[in-house]
Amino acid sequence: MKHCLIIFTFILFTFYSLKSSGQWYDDPVNHSCLKCHAFQTYSFHNDLMDKEEKRLMNPFFIQDTVALKKGVHKQFDCTDCHSYEYETYPHSANLKLEPMATCLDCHGGDETFAPYQFEKIDEEVKKSIHYQVYGENFTCSKCHSQHTYTTTARNSNDVLEIVNYSNQICLSCHNDMRKYMLISGHENPKLVEIHNWLPNQELHFQHVRCIECHTEVVDGLMVSHNIQGKDKAVRKCAECHTSDSRLKSSLYKYQNLQVRSEGGVLNTIFSNDSYIIGMQESPFLKLASIIIFIATLGGIVIHLTFRIIKKK
């Protein structure tokens, strides 16, 4: 009996510790909505037939709990953004007509978020081709999922990670026929075919973001949001492959600054795979050049040492 009491006390203490620290609410498993929306199937009681039923969840409504946990909004409950009426199942059909909250509904006019320049981003979006064509229907959530969004570009020192994350956002629509047609209403052009003019196409897709060629660069913003029409896309190699490359004011502007602030210019050269603007290195040749450099330096030191010893 004594042991049971100790175990019960420990469990109770752990529960309240997690709850008070916020970790309990951080855990997506504990969101009531995710009891259904985190799985391929869901169960419910059919009152009409008076029996339990199991059905497949709409794949567009399934949430990745791992991605949720990594997202910037992980501490919020679903009903912080969605109507509390969603807590009742079956959900009312009218809830589908509920207007979705925008980023500025929470982040606009708040000095806490001033460094992120949400208002400036909103101004740039309204200049973009997306907004010009689709107007108010093209919201932040069309590119940035409120459920899984992470600040990869701000926090990563890895150019390839930033490129991959950013390009996946673009490709989630532009390489997905169903989602593209949902927004555009017309057939999705094949990306490989419309980029046939681009030499080493695969390497470009892997090492630079789509927005490098498809946005108007704004110095005051971390990421440009003014997406240009295809007729204004960058097509000249010299725009990137020169000493005054536009990449310096876009993809590389924050990554190189972060690396250099942590370890100086040498650290940039040895740790950054893309420190040469507009070029990509061969890892083997890079390693070989470092070995040759160290061996040459070692040879000079040994030679000088023997010259000094000989003089003595």
Image (cartoon, rainbow, N blue to C red):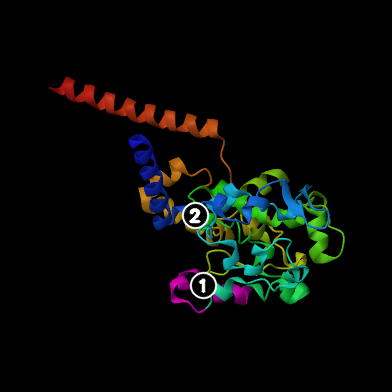
- Tell me the SS state at disc 2: helix
Q: Which mark is residue 10?
A: none
- Tell me the SS state at disc 1: loop
Asked whether residue 252 appears in the rendered view, the answer is yes
Quadrant assignment, res 19:
bottom left
Rounded to the nearest whole Å, what is the CA distance between mark 1 and mark 2? 26 Å
Which residues are the magenta region?
109-124
Numbered marks: total: 2
Q: Residue 26 carries which label?
A: 2
Q: Where is residue 76 in the image (x, y as percent from the top left)?
A: 53, 62
Does the magenta segment cover residue 119?
yes
Q: Where is residue 292 in the image (x, y as percent from the top left)?
A: 43, 28
> In the rendered view, would you say 179 is above or below 284?
below
Q: Position of residue 59 (x, y in %)?
A: 75, 51
Asked if the residues shown at circle 1 and circle 2 are in contact, with their CB atoms under 8 angstroms apart, the answer is: no
- The main secondary structure of the magenta stretch is helix
Does the magenta segment cover residue 281?
no
State the residue in front, 126 or 311: 126
| 294 sits to left or right of 137 | left
* The N terminus lies in quadrant: top left
Amino acid at circle 1: Gln
Please report whichever mark, 1 or 2, sits nearer to the chain's N-terminal start. Answer: 2
Can you identify the residue that label 1 sits on? 117
